[in-house]
Image (tube, rainbow, N blue to C red):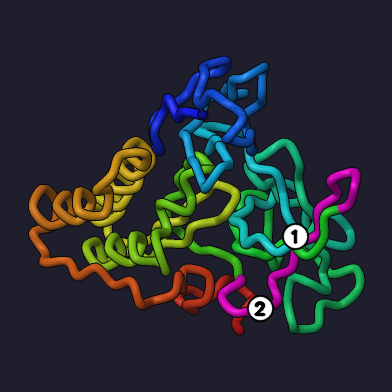
Amino acid sequence: MGEILLENKNIAVPGEIIATGMDYLPGQGTYREGENIRAGKLGLVNTEGRAVKLISLSGKYLPKRGDTVIGRVEDVAFSGWRVSLNCAYSAMLSIVEASSEYIPKGADLTKYMDVGDYIIAKITNVTSQILVDLTMKGPGLRQLGSGRILEVNTNKVPRIIGKQGSMVSMIKQATDCRILVGQNGLVWIQGEPKGEFIAVEAIKKIERESHISGLTDRIKEFLEKEETGKKIEINTGDENKSFSTPQYQGKNFER
């Protein structure tokens, strides 16, 4: 007869026994040693049926096709822009994928985007050598304007966005800020200085406390009582429109 020694959302350290017996199966982040299932890394226990898994508490972003990411232009080439993605791998944004408008051959691309500019884009391809291609053709994909960039743990991005965008919607509602959350762990925040500060503090609180139950209620209370004084409504029917709301149009990329 098997036994679970660590309940869901408990933190397990590498080598720690999570479950015993052959009734349970090792999943992602765990391994079997005799009758025991042990943690292969630091993470939160997640038991689904007979499968015992770990959700990472740390780790760098690995680019995946279809991800929406926030990147920083780090170089301007002849045929496009090299973009940093907050990980070990950079990406390429070609002229063709940067804009629907015609850009003449040999044009000075710094007039469109320059080193240091931030964009929100979608990954269209990742090769076996981790060569990454981006596009800015799509709803909400664009150059970002002035604002604050915050780096968060990529594993906490789903909690920051919330179910159907509920968490990030609460923060937007309380702070009157525009907020975009990239799946690569970069967050863009644009608003009044006080609103930006409160948004940053709320996101950091989510990052710190994402493994503790009752997170939504605590963030709601934080935003209502401790910071903004506003009455916040939790909206779980609104999809995460962080990537599709046309809130800012970048220079020379009016769409």
Work out whether 255 lies above or below 174: below
Please tell me which residue lies in front, 146 or 9. 9
Which secondary structure lies at badge 2?
Answer: loop
x and y percentages locating residue 106 in the rendered image: 90, 68
How many numbered discs sit on the rendered protein?
2
Q: Image quadrant of residue 191?
A: bottom left
| Chief SS of the magenta region | loop
Give, as a three-letter code, the residue at label 1.
Arg
Which secondary structure lies at badge 1?
Answer: loop
Residue visible at 33% across and 67% down in the picture? 169
Q: Is residue 189 visible?
A: yes
| Range shown magenta | 127-141
Q: CA distance from mark 1 to mark 2?
A: 15 Å
Q: Nearer the viewer, mark 1 or mark 2?
A: 1
Is residue 62 left or right of 190 when viewed as pictured? right
Is residue 231 left or right of 179 when viewed as pictured? left
**Residue contact at pointers 1 and 2, CB within 8 angstroms:** no
Q: Residues within 10 Å of mark 1 (few under 14, many from 20)?
A: some
Of all residues, the one furthest to the front in this rendering is 1
- Give the label on residue 108, or none: none
Residue visible at 42% across and 69% down in the picture? 164
Residue corresponding to mark 1: 65
x and y percentages locating residue 13 in the rendered image: 50, 19
Residue corresponding to mark 2: 138
Please tell me which residue lies in front, 246 or 104. 246
Q: Residues within 10 Å of mark 2 (few under 14, many from 20)?
A: few
Query: In the rendered structure, does residue 243 fall within the stretch colored magenta?
Result: no
Give, as a three-letter code, the residue at label 2.
Gly
Work out whether 55 lies above or below 189: above
Query: In the rendered structure, does residue 130 fall within the stretch colored magenta?
Result: yes
x and y percentages locating residue 17 in the rendered image: 52, 19
Work out whether 204 lies above or below 110: above
